[in-house]
Image: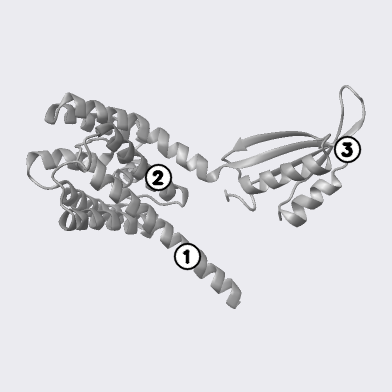
Amino acid sequence: MYMTGSIEMKEKLKHFLLLTVSTLIMAVGTYFFKFTNNFTFGGITGLAVLIAKTGFMSASDFTFVMNMILLVIGFIVLGRKFTAKTAYCSILLSVTLSVLERVYPMSHPLTDQPMLELCFAIALPSLGSAVLFNIGSSSGGTDIIAMILKKYSSFDIGRALLATDIAITIAGCFMFDVKTGLYSFLGLAIRSFMIDTFIESFNLSKYFNVVCDVPEPICDFIVNTLHRSATVCHAQGAFSGRDKYIVFTALNRPQAVKLRNFIKENQPEAFILISNTSEIIGKGFHSI
């Protein structure tokens, strides 16, 4: 009983650290590279850049105010569907941006290389968002709007949010200059792709089909050394007509290297097909 409670506590602590670190990464990328270069892609923070240009409010303060308003609306409208994790990340992101603005005020970009800064303005928030999505959370903002639209309408939410992002980016072309607007469009195009790439990379596993004559040693290695399971099917070689066995298993990358080396050393005549997959649902991987 004590061991179970200790394991659960460690998992909760790990989860909390992931939420915190990924949100701080997003804040650093947004404040140091996005706000200072007037890049307008990306929901609430993109709109914040436009508002800051009018002089009405700083980008950090606008992000804080909008996220707090959306949090309140989310709690009222969504109720229990609105998770504490999203609320925590949204508050942490907003507070961190406001603190950075006061502790380290910036009136110009860190470098004179806008393309380099665009890379960091895309990569850091995308990495943070991918980690949050991967553990079932988000940083709030337009994600809250999407959750509300999903509950009360039949809109294509993805298209609606994309149209909003495009409109904000187009407005940036008029409020700043064409070069900044083009950089923002480039950032908008790359951002979604990069988030998906990060998520697939986090979840990447190796799927093995091993065609062999003697499956027992391979299965024993998978079960007792790698602590995974496998499925064995009887087969027949089309050319030789000989009896064969196919061993199916799914492993993470370090385990895949170990299994490949084991087969190479012990059954070099085996035929191996290895595929990349980021969608494995079942015990030891992801639950439904």
* Disc 1 element: helix
Q: Nearer the viewer, residue 112 or 247?
A: 112
Foreground residue among 58 and 36: 36
Q: Secondary structure at mark 2?
A: helix
Residue 44 visible within the image:
no
| Marks 3 and 2, the one that precedes in the sequence | 2
Question: Does 184 appear above or below 71?
Answer: above
Local packing at callout 2 (Cα closer than 10 Å; few below 14, some 14-19, many 20+) is many
Residue 38 percent across, percent down from the top left: 19, 37
Q: Position of residue 269 (x, y in %)?
A: 84, 34
Task: Give the Cα distance between marks 1 and 3.
Answer: 45 Å
Q: Residue at x 50, y 70 (%)?
A: 9
Question: Dot 2 corresponds to which residue?
Answer: 127
Instruction: Name the spot of residue 205 as percent of width and height, x first.
Output: 61, 43
Residue at the (76%, 45%) spot, across then down: 262
Q: How many marks?
A: 3
Q: Write down the residue under mark 1.
A: 12
What is the three-letter code of the residue carrying label 2?
Answer: Leu
Q: Are marks 1 and 3 in contact (CB under 8 Å)?
A: no
First-in-chain label (1 vs 3): 1
Q: Nearer the viewer, mark 1 or mark 2?
A: 2
Residue 60 in sight here: yes
Between 33 and 1, which is closer to the camera in this rendering?
33
Residue carrying label 3: 213
* Residue for point 29% across, 52% down: 74
Q: Nearer the viewer, mark 1 or mark 3?
A: 3
